[in-house]
């Protein structure tokens, strides 16, 4: 979840039907998807998670349109027993972001792993942020401050960013940059046509362009306000 320190909007859960419609619109263009990953915020806080997993499995995994359902967690919550049952029943992989070194007093990763082992739930532990040096954090910058780059500089800047082609589907729109998506969803930034592919109206050529990490300008307008993925914070800054 990008730009947490700058979120002044009241955050709310996505409506269940909105998520279902977004997934359905995505599969208008795609025959098979290797992984569908649900991310937060904290996914285990979502009140309709059980129903969402069940719907996705029965409509897409069972029909072999999706290979695997993955949910992410920051390891600070233990899900309800009914959620554990659904995770096991539908063979969901839980990706645990291991922040034990950063938030020792709030982390429940050890207890979570014990629960998953007991219930036979698949999980993976992700702790290597920043290459060989663990527990590194990206500095995405202050999204209210511009870099004042011109068009050529923005294109070069976008080419160097390592986060391109990370698809985020929201409100029947596909963003291939999670920072751009977060700026709209969580910061209230006005959408620009170049930000996304509209899964309800755009043609397959435009979909493939965005799916492969391209866009109409060769950069996003929001690049002028983002540090991109590449600069790490040191311990004193966290």
Image: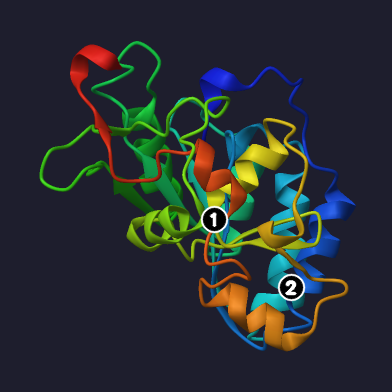
Helix, strand or loop under label 1 = loop
Q: Nearer the viewer, residue 6 or 48?
A: 6
Say few, some or many: other residues with alpha carbon within 10 Å of mark 1 (under 14 / 14 to 19 / 20 or more).
many
Q: CA distance from mark 1 to mark 2?
A: 16 Å
Coloring scheme of the render? rainbow
Helix, strand or loop under label 2 = helix
Q: Nearer the viewer, residue 216 or 137?
A: 216
Does any portion of residue 62 appear in the rendered image?
no
Q: Is residue 157 left or right of residue 17?
A: left
Say few, some or many: other residues with alpha carbon within 10 Å of mark 2 (under 14 / 14 to 19 / 20 or more).
many
Image quarter where the C terminus lies is top left
Does any portion of residue 135 appear in the rendered image?
yes
Q: Position of residue 202 (x, y in %)?
A: 81, 77
Q: Position of residue 121 (x, y in %)?
A: 45, 54
Q: Nearer the viewer, residue 64 or 223?
A: 223
Residue corresponding to mark 2: 26
Q: Is residue 158 left or right of residue 22?
A: left
The residue positioned 40% from the left and 38% from the top of the image is 227
Checking the image for residue 100, the label placed there is none
The residue positioned 59% from the left and 66% from the top of the image is 217
Q: Nearer the viewer, residue 14 or 58?
A: 14
Q: Position of residue 214 (x, y in %)?
A: 54, 73
In this view, 77 is above or below 168: above
Quadrant of the image occupied by residue 29: bottom right
Q: Position of residue 213 (x, y in %)?
A: 51, 71
Q: How many marks?
A: 2
Residue corresponding to mark 1: 177
The residue positioned 27% from the left and 15% from the top of the image is 237
Q: Nearer the viewer, mark 1 or mark 2?
A: 1
In this view, 222 is above or below 201: above
The residue positioned 85% from the left and 63% from the top of the image is 21
Quadrant of the image occupied by residue 83: top right
């Amino acid at each position: 979840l990008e730009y947490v320190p700058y979120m002044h909007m009241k955050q709310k859960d996505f409506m269940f039907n909105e998520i279902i419609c977004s997934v359905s619109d995505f599969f208008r263009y795609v025959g098979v998807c290797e992984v569908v990953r649900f991310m937060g915020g904290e996914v285990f806080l979502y009140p309709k998670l059980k129903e969402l997993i069940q719907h996705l499995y029965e409509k897409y995994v069972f029909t072999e349109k999706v290979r695997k359902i993955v949910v992410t967690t920051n390891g600070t919550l233990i899900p309800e027993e009914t959620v554990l049952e659904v995770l096991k029943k539908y063979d969901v992989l839980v990706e645990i972001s291991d922040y034990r070194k950063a938030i020792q007093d709030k982390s429940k990763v050890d207890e979570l792993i014990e629960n998953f082992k007991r219930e036979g739930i698949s999980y993976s532990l992700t702790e290597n942020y920043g290459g060989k040096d663990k527990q590194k954090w990206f500095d995405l910058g202050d999204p209210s401050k511009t870099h004042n780059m011109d068009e050529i500089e923005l294109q070069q800047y976008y080419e160097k960013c390592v986060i391109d082609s990370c698809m985020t589907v929201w409100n029947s729109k596909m963003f291939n940059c999670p920072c751009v998506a977060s700026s709209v969803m969580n910061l209230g930034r006005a959408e620009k046509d170049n930000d996304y592919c509209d899964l309800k109206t755009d043609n397959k050529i435009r979909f493939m362009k965005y799916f492969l990490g391209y866009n109409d300008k060769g950069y996003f307008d929001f690049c002028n306000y983002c540090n991109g993925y590449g600069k790490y914070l040191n311990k004193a800054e966290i």
